[in-house]
Amino acid sequence: MRVRVVLFATLKDLLGQRQLDLALEDGQATVDAVRQALMTQYPQASANLSAALAAVNEEFASADDPVRDGDEVAFFPPVSGGDGLPEIFILNNNPIDHDDLIARITTPQTGAVVFFSGLVRGETQREGHLPQTEYLEYEAYEPMALAKMRQVAQEVRQRWPKVIGIAIVQRIGRLEVGQNTVLIACSASHRDDGCFEAARYGIDRLKEIVPVWKKEVTPQAQRWIEGEYRPGPADRA
């Protein structure tokens, strides 16, 4: 049997390729079998593969989940609609137009909109980061990222049912210091209808389950920034 393996961030760099076809013995196979086969073929990436998260056909998977002929298996580091109500999910490298997004997630009942908007920092005083950054390079496991953005919106609606509109925007590619990187926006009839809490939850949850990574770049160094959260069964849609 053969499966397609897709790699992101540090793993893509270590193996020197984004995707590859992997042959496995016929019969029952698991995610762990795919991982072990890759570690055998690419020992230089063993430590990273051992710690990587996995997805099968764009859904989080555990070690003993089955893998079938023709499946797509992705490995990556830990990461960063409903009922006719307005929802927007964007994954591209276009500048974020805040006024346009406000217009698209408001209705005649809307009286409040809360935004969280992330920017590229030029200086970072935090362990695991380069102290100075010239630019960031973002990449995403795109089909899965969009699906997980929708999951975040569904979770927001379950917790704050008075939220009217939701926008989740993630830029990818090269982004310079001072540019917007990500946006979460939630609208509601009143400011005390949960829109503040929903926007905060949205960005925190995006950083946990939406497969997006960033590389900090300076003329002297490059570093992928990887998270620590490891999704479990409760994180599956």
Image (cartoon, helix red, strand yellow):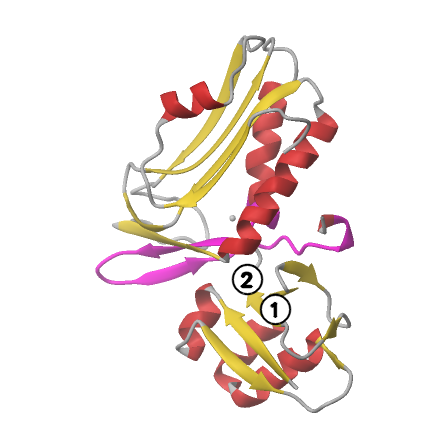
For numbered disc 2, what is the local secondary structure? Answer: loop
Q: Picture coordinates of residue 88 (x, y %)?
A: 51, 33
| Residue holding disc 1 | 51
Q: Write down the quadrant of residue 194 in the picture.
A: top right
Residue 52, relative to residue 82: is it above or below?
below
Looking at the rendered structure, the secondary structure element under dot 1 is helix
Residue found 34% across the figure and 41% down from its top? 120
Q: Residue at x 57, y 84 (%)?
A: 22
Region of the chain picked out in magenta, as a range = 207-234
Question: How far across and how far down the image is residue 91, in percent?
Answer: 44, 45
Q: Amino acid at mark 1?
A: Ala
User: Residue 225: within the magenta?
Assistant: yes
Q: Position of residue 178 (x, y in %)?
A: 28, 36
- Identity of the residue drawn at 65% across and 88% down: 24
Mark 2, residue position: 77
Query: Do the numbered discs 2 and 1 sit on residues whose CB atoms are within 8 Å?
Result: yes
Q: Nearer the viewer, residue 126 or 59?
A: 59
